[in-house]
Image (spheres, grey):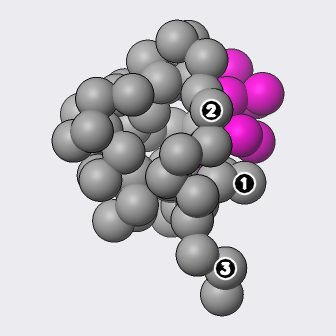
Amino acid sequence: MAVPDLDAPLTAPEFDSLREVAKGFKRRTNLPEAHQARLLELELVREALGGLMLTEAGELRLARGH
């Protein structure tokens, strides 16, 4: 398993999508596909039961505020 890159750049809209996932389980249809792909690629979110959930790396990224 790769180590997530917590310094990889995110656009402001991608970070907003990460915040949306942090509010709780998010159905995949609620976020732009490009944002989903980027957040999954960076391992900031994971797929679960047809939706998305934050990973530990995603929680750390949100705590850093960017």
Which quarter of the figure has residue 20?
A: top left
Q: Which mark is residue 2?
A: 3
Give the residue at x 58% y 75%: 3
Q: Which mark is residue 9?
A: 2
Q: Is residue 38 magenta?
A: yes
Residue 2 seen in the figure: yes
Instruction: Specify few, some or many for label 2: CA neighbours under 10 Å numbering under 14, 14-19, or 20 or more.
Output: few
Q: Earlier in the sequence, mark 3 or mark 1?
A: 3
Q: Are marks 2 and 1 in contact (CB under 8 Å)?
A: no
Q: Earlier in the sequence, mark 3 or mark 2?
A: 3
Q: Main secondary structure of the magenta part?
A: helix
Residue at the extreme bottom of the image, as rendered:
1
For marks 3 and 1, give the CA distance.
10 Å
User: In the displayed structure, does residue 51 sit left or right of residue 23?
Assistant: right
Which quarter of the figure has residue 32?
A: top right
Disc 2 versus disc 1: nearer the observer: 2
Residue at disc 2, secondary structure: loop
Please name the amino acid that badge 2 sits on: Pro
User: In the displayed structure, does residue 21 sit left or right of residue 17?
Assistant: left
Write the start and end of the magenta stretch as one range: 32-39
Q: Position of residue 7 (x, y in %)?
A: 53, 45
Give the residue at x 60% y 28%: 10
Residue 31 seen in the figure: no
Which quarter of the figure has residue 39?
A: top right
Q: Which mark is residue 41?
A: 1
The relative height of residue 1 versus residue 29 in the rendered view (above or below) is below
Residue at disc 1, secondary structure: helix
For marks 3 and 2, give the CA distance.
17 Å
